[in-house]
């Protein structure tokens, strides 16, 4: 009787030599390239607050959106602000605004840090949809994150009011140009401000308008300790800007 046949032993798989990685990791020239702006808003936690506070917010837009003071762009921003007010949110209230060629200034009342973030997120979505519609485009609208500066004193609020509402004069001065003495920027809420020196008859914001009447003491009474704001003032940027 022939001996039983043994099954052949399986061959051992050959061990492959691992080549060193040639991609990824830290190296010179890697990563996202600069967007063209010299200084952006750093991606770090925002300063928190737990009580109602005045906040100066700045939103910068991409160049391909066009001049924000153009008729179509400004109407889109104005409508987005009106939509935000129509929603009836009370934890974030836009009190004043100023639209410049590439950016938007807002002076808001916010209940706390989370309310500021939620409210700005909703406003940013409305702004993006309406501005994209004016250009027949899709995609990003903003150049970077919104910048928020907390205002805690009457002096800070006074300076912010002058800077936001007279911001067009500030930029004109940089181009060695001027506006007439009693001129109010039509791309802002300057017509609703009752603290001008040299202008009478300011009207309150309409119920369906883009801004709310102020409620916070700093924005109604506190800033007046430092006097009225001159309508012809050319403001300097806030400290630590």
Image (spheres, rainbow, N blue to C red):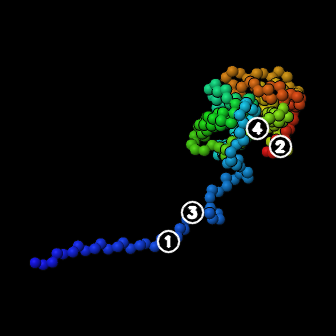
The residue sitting at the bottom extreme is 2
The residue positioned 62% from the left and 58% from the top of the image is 31
User: Residue 206: horizontal and vertical position, in percent?
Assistant: 71, 21
- Give the quarter of the figure containing the N terminus: bottom left
Secondary element type, mark 2:
loop
Residue at image coords 84%, 32% = 154
- Locate residue 132 relative to residue 229 in the image: left or right: left
Label 4: how many Cα within 10 Å (few below 14, some 14–19, many 20+)? some
Q: Position of residue 192 (x, y in %)?
A: 77, 25
| Local crowd size for mark 2, using a 10 Å CA cut-off: few (<14), some (14–19), many (≥20) | few
Q: Position of residue 7 (x, y in %)?
A: 23, 73
Q: CA distance from mark 4 to mark 1?
A: 53 Å
Q: Nearer the viewer, residue 226 or 49?
A: 49
Q: Which residue is disc 2 drawn over?
A: 239
The residue carrying mark 3 is 24
Between 234 and 89, the residue placed more toward the observer is 89
How far apart are labels 1 and 3 at the CA level?
14 Å
- For the residues labelled 3 and 4, say whether their Cβ atoms are less than 8 Å apart: no
Element at badge 1? loop
Q: Could you tell me which residue is drawn at 56 percent across and 43 percent down?
A: 138
Q: Residue at x 18, y 75 (%)?
A: 5
Q: For residue 10, which quarter of the picture?
A: bottom left
Q: Which residue is under mark 1?
A: 19
- The residue wearing badge 4 is 150
Residues at marks 4 and 2, CA–CA distance in whole angstroms: 12 Å
Nearer mark to the viewer, of 4 and 2: 4
Could one spot residue 160 in this view of the protein?
yes
Q: Is residue 221 left or right of residue 37?
A: right
Dot 4: element: strand
Q: Earlier in the sequence, mark 1 or mark 3?
A: 1
Q: Specify which label sits upstream in the sequence, 3 or 2.
A: 3
Label 3 vs 4, first from the N-terminus: 3
């Amino acid at each position: 009787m022939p001996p039983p046949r043994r099954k052949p032993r399986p061959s051992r798989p050959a061990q492959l030599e691992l080549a060193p990685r040639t991609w990824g990791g830290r190296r010179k020239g890697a990563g996202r390239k600069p967007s063209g702006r010299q200084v952006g808003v750093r991606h770090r936690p925002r300063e928190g607050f737990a009580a109602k506070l005045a906040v100066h917010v700045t939103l910068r837009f991409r160049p391909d959106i066009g001049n924000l003071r153009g008729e179509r762009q400004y109407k889109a921003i104005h409508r987005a602000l009106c939509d935000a007010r129509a929603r009836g949110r009370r934890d974030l209230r836009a009190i004043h605004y100023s639209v410049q060629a590439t950016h938007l200034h807002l002076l808001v009342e916010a209940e706390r840090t989370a309310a500021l973030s939620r409210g700005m997120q909703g406003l940013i979505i409305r702004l993006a949809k309406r501005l994209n519609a004016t250009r027949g485009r899709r995609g990003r609208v903003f150049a970077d994150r919104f910048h928020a500066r907390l205002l805690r004193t009457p002096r800070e609020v006074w300076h912010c009011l002058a800077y936001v509402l007279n911001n067009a004069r500030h930029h004109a001065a940089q181009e060695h140009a001027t506006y007439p003495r009693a001129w109010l920027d039509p791309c802002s809420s300057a017509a609703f401000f009752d603290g001008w020196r040299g202008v009478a008859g300011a009207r309150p914001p309409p119920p369906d308008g883009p801004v709310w009447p102020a409620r916070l003491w700093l924005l109604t009474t506190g800033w007046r300790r430092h006097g009225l704001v001159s309508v012809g003032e050319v403001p300097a940027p806030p400290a630590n800007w």
